[in-house]
Image: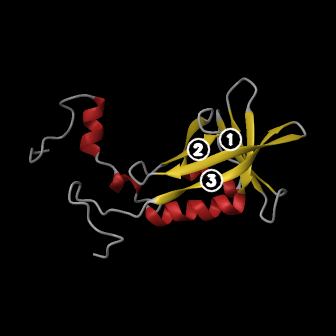
Amino acid sequence: MSERWRRDDRTGRTAVPPVGPWRTTGHRVHGDLEVPIEVVFSYDPADPWAVRASFGQLGGAVDWTLSRELLHCGIRTACGVGDVQLWPLRRGGRQGRLRIRLGGTGVPVLVDVDRSELRTWLSATFHAVPAGTESSRIDWAAEAEHIGPGLAPESGAEQ
């Protein structure tokens, strides 16, 4: 195998190239006021369904875990329920912005990021771990051990 797609001897799964974080200046929206805010999206192929999003400056940032598929959907159409909702805006740049609504019943936080740049970054995550192959990245026996000892399948045991 090439260096880029070599097998990980510890897990037996194919190692994938890392996806670097995307750092951008978003806009926190409150009425007609827009305040610049640092936003960092990061992706770890070991947790293939999740994207980490950090809003604000280091030390004072608020971190959220978002669904990669939800972000992908939100670039194209309104989606999400409850604490996380997304929808595309046609203003704010050549390709527009993605509005991210965070929060439940209280006053929500609205943050806009560039849709085109997010689309480009998300494309790299789907290149690293294609849609539909995420479950092959999970060590299910290790996950079962986190839930409780003795729940992992015995190696070599009959099923």
In the displayed image of the protein, which residue is found farthest to the top?
106
Q: Residue at x 48, y 59 (%)?
A: 19
Quadrant position of residue 144: top left
In the displayed image of the protein, which residue is found farthest to the bottom?
2
In the displayed image of the protein, which residue is found farthest to the right?
32
**What whole-number distance in Å separates the C-alpha atoms at marks 2 and 3?**
10 Å
Whichever of callouts 2 and 3 sits on the residue coming sooner in the sequence is: 3
Q: Secondary structure at mark 3?
A: strand
Whichever of callouts 2 and 1 sits on the residue coming sooner in the sequence is: 2
Q: At which x and y percent is residue 149?
A: 21, 29
Residue bearing the label numbered 2: 53
Q: Secondary structure at mark 2?
A: strand
Residue bearing the label numbered 1: 85
Q: How many marks?
A: 3
Residues at marks 2 and 1 touching, judged by CB atoms closer than 8 Å: no
Q: Secondary structure at mark 1?
A: strand
Q: Which mark is residue 23?
A: 3
Q: At which x and y percent is residue 128?
A: 45, 64
Q: Quadrant of the N terminus?
A: bottom left
Q: Is residue 8 above or below residue 37?
A: below
Q: At which x and y percent is residue 150?
A: 18, 30
Please, what is the three-letter code of the amino acid marked with disc 2? Ala
Is disc 2 surrounded by few (<14), some (14 to 19) or many (20+) residues within 10 Å? many
Q: Quadrant of the C terminus?
A: top left
Q: Residue at x 76, y 55 (%)?
A: 97
Please, what is the three-letter code of the amino acid marked with disc 1? Gln
The mark closer to the camera, 2 or 1, is 2
**What whole-number distance in Å separates the C-alpha atoms at marks 1 and 3?**
21 Å
Residues at marks 1 and 3 touching, judged by CB atoms closer than 8 Å: no
Q: Residue at x 44, y 52 (%)?
A: 44
Q: Is residue 3 above or below residue 90?
A: below
Quadrant position of residue 6: bottom left
